[in-house]
Image (tube, helix red, strand yellow):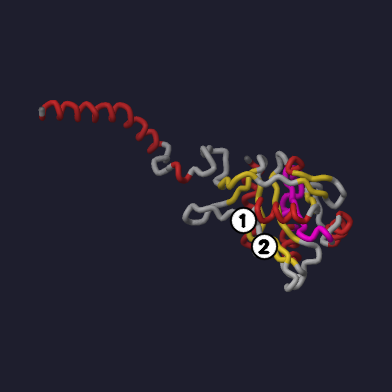
């Protein structure tokens, strides 16, 4: 019985060696031996893809821009674009966000495959006419930079539920509205993309108020435009 057991064990080892050993050697040659499914969150990794993570699809929207044109997800199809939520009369963080978004726009001004969606959270005031004046005031340029307005409830749903970027009314604070100072980055396929932290977790959004966040989003836009 012991001999049969040894023979069976030897046979299993032999099969393992024939089938798996070449695969292990292959992975070592390709420097792939430490990769696991847990790290491949965005699917199969290929040499021509960036190392940015895919979070999920951007929410559907259909809003009106500063030229009274209807702009939707389809308007950005095949483009890399950045989304922010703001309002034109914001006395606090919005001017900083506008200034930093201009830096992003200027970095890709000659690229027709880049765009920006600046969505107001105060549409009752921010009509297309108001947004047009606002865009001229801050000297926003770029044919794909749209300042968007529409139904307030829908916009809040897009912000809070769709992008998970906080926006709300608060009559007790200066300006009457509060919102995050974060930017969302969307790729050519309409997916929200982001970089990872040191532990491999998604950072998801980019700080629109700090230079570090602006530097990072410009780097990642460049990667996505190359995909």
Residue highlighted by disc 2: 180
What residue is at 27 percent from the left and 26 percent from the top?
Answer: 15
Q: Is residue 103 visible?
A: no
Position of residue 153 measured from the top left corner of the image (x, y, whole percent): 75, 55
Left or right: 111 in relation to 16? right
Which one is nearer the viewer's eye here, 155 or 142?
155
- Above or below residue 65? Residue 37 is above
What residue is at 71 percent from the left and 39 percent from the top?
Answer: 78
Instruction: Classify residue 48 by image quadrant.
Output: top right
Which one is nearer the viewer's eye here, 85 or 209?
85
Mark closest to the chain's N terminus, 1 or 2 = 2
Q: Which residues are magenta?
A: 102-124
Left or right: 121 in relation to 47? right
Nearest-to-viewer mark from 1 and 2: 2
**Quadrant of the image for the N terminus?**
top left
Judge the density around disc 2: few (<14), some (14-19), many (≥20) Cα neighbours within 10 Å.
some
Residue highlighted by disc 1: 205
Left or right: 198 in relation to 133? left
- 106 drawn magenta: yes
Which one is nearer the viewer's eye here, 100 or 186?
186
- Above or below residue 81? Residue 206 is below
**Quadrant of the image for the C terminus?**
top right
What residue is at 76 percent from the left and 44 percent from the top?
Answer: 72
Position of residue 171 measured from the top left corner of the image (x, y, whole percent): 75, 70
> Extreme front residue here?
153
Q: Secondary structure at mark 2?
A: loop
Q: CA distance from mark 1 to mark 2?
A: 10 Å
Position of residue 140 measured from the top left corner of the image (x, y, whole percent): 81, 56
């Amino acid at each position: 019985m012991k001999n049969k057991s040894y023979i069976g064990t030897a046979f299993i080892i032999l099969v393992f060696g024939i089938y798996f050993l070449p695969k292990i050697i292959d992975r070592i040659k390709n420097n792939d031996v430490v990769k696991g499914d847990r790290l491949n969150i965005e699917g199969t990794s290929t040499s021509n893809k960036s190392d940015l993570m895919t979070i999920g699809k951007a929410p559907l929207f259909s809003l009106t821009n500063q030229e009274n044109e209807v702009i939707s997800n389809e308007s950005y199809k095949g483009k890399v674009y950045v989304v922010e939520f703001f309002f034109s009369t914001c006395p606090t963080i919005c001017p900083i966000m506008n200034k930093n978004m201009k830096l992003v726009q200027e970095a890709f001004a000659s690229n027709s495959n880049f765009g920006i969606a600046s969505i107001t959270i105060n549409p009752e005031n921010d009509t297309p006419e108001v947004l047009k004046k606002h865009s001229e005031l801050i000297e926003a340029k770029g044919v794909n930079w749209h300042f968007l307005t529409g139904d307030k409830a829908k916009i809040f749903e897009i912000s809070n539920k769709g992008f998970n970027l906080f926006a709300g009314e608060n009559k007790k604070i200066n300006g009457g509205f509060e919102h995050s100072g974060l930017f969302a980055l969307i790729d050519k396929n309409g997916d929200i993309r982001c970089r990872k932290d040191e532990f491999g977790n998604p950072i998801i959004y980019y700080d629109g108020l700090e230079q570090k966040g602006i530097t990072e989003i410009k780097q990642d836009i460049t990667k996505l435009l190359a995909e």
